[in-house]
Image (cartoon, rainbow, N blue to C red):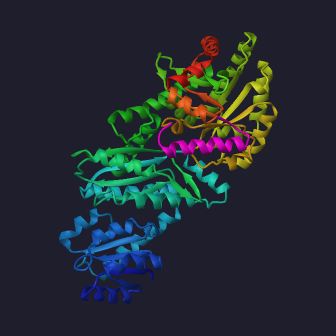
Amino acid sequence: MSQLVLISNTGSARDALVDALKDNGVHCLCASQEQAVQLACSTQTTCVVLLDGDGCDAAALLQHIRSTQVLAHTVVVVIAAADTLAARTAAGADAVIADNAGVEKIRAVIESALVRREQWLGTQHHESGKSFAARHVQSALEQGQLGSVLLLRFDHFTNVSTALNSLGVASDALQVEVERSLHARLTPLLPTGSWMTYMDEENFLIALPRNIVGLETLADTVVQAARMPLFLAQREIRLRTHAGLCVVVSGEKVDARTLIGRAEMAADQARSGAHSAAAHWLASMSSQVLNDLQLASALQHAVEHSEFQLLFQPQINMNRGDVYGAEALIRWTSPVGVSIAPGRFVVVAQECGVMDQITLWSLREACRQCAAWEQLGLHIRVAVNITANQLANPRFVDTVRGVLNESGVSGAQLAVEISEAAILSNPQAFSAPLTTLRNLGATVCVDDFGVGVATLANMKALPVSELKIDRSFIRPLPGAAPDRMMVQTMLALSKQLNMRMVAVGVENVTQWAWLKEQACDSAQGWLIGKAVAANEFPALVGEIRQNKFAAASWRTTL
């Protein structure tokens, strides 16, 4: 063993330990507390040994080390007096040992901690991160110092990272930047005794001490800080972030993996319910996991027996006030008569592998309905959402061609919508099938535009003709100057690139009037019309067309 070990302290105790470790083949660099972190960073040391006592506040220094990005994987061993071991253990060190243990014991502890570090760094990150987190949570639990765990979950992280990689950004750059930013933002917010770590690319764990006053407020503050934009390769990136909070129940016998699993359940609940704050774990969530298994079975039955329904929401040309299209939105009522929200069953459908079948049913039903409206003299374009997995399937384009032929609908009456994150997860591979779809006459639309890493310059290389501005940008309009500027920039650049812009989630007259003044092409939302069943859609279109969507009168009422 000839690892570099940094000992922060002064005096005879340090000198004696340095000499003893040197005799055992361990090379040491010494530093005061003020110099310790700087020296550890500059030497990229693998292990820091803290001699707790006069001249070295191990707890404070450990917190500083844990919040320093380049030392994220550095092993920290604390040597402390026997009466302070418990407190130092709770602070989050990799190992804590009594100062009278003897050099052989100290050397063995350091060596063991370094071996664990190498094992962790040498295994796959998603496994090692969870193991690392569980080990520290378990240690804090056993010492009675853990109060709660807060899990931050980043949606579509892999897709965004892959998209950045296609733009020349290093494959791990996003994770490094997220980790660096979170440590910088959250360290000033968290109380003493907290620590944080990446579990895997999409999950970041924060362990919090007991007896925090205002825990819920603290959790919400942390979530909001995590949602602030990142800046990478001269791009602003906003990751969709959800959070789950699990509080340790006094007297309950529970281990670290159970606590972390509960926080994961709560984060799932936050995602499916679109919570803006952290969702708290409840015992009923465990029952929900079992319910998901039953839901997966029911979904398979629904696929086999076509139990779904499509609702259609009108899309309107803002200049003419006329309906030109409809987005097909899938709905499902379970066999026992309960309506299941799309956000709930779509997640389960993706996990159990039936989402592609559901989307194919949606495509066929939407085209069939489009043909039926055509016979009534209603010329409407239908938009169907597709997934990255379907677009990657080499048979998908032939499937679309077959559906158009069997329904008698022309390609011009079909729009395919794919999310921004999905389309940029592999733009080179998707370019060819999207081009073929466009050659069939179909419109290629990018949904949720603006929430990921895409820019209009990226999009111009793809066969995309329509962008749907995510509702999160529309909701605050006309709002503050930054909100307006963001949408104005999107609209201006889309005109230069000859792409149509559709504003999604237009719910009030103020939003409509502002967007119309900015020459936005189209709109969709409750103000224009809610999603209705196919047999109700012609009447809704007739009402909108008869009123010409009251665009002129709206402007006079503002």
Q: Give the residue drawn at x 43%, y 57%.
A: 182
- Where is residue 273 drawn, in percent x and y? 44, 34
Residue shown at the point (33%, 66%) measured from the top left: 63
Which residue is farthest left?
A: 83
Residue 59 percent across, percent down from the top left = 28, 68
Please tell me whether the stretch drawn in magenta is mainly helix, strand or loop: helix
x and y, in percent, of residue 485 in the image? 55, 45
133 in magenta: no
Quadrant including the N terminus: bottom left
In terms of depth relative to the viewer, which is nearer, 43 or 414? 414
Q: Is residue 493 magenta?
A: yes
Seen in the image, is 286 located left or right of residue 55?
A: right
The image quarter containing residue 101 is bottom left
Q: In this view, does 377 lie to the left or right of 186?
A: right
Residue at the image position 41 percent from the left and 44 percent from the top? 243
The answer to whether 375 is drawn above or below residue 296 in the figure is above
Pick the front one: 22 or 207? 207
Residue range corresponding to the magenta coloring? 478-501
Which quadrant holds residue 326? top right
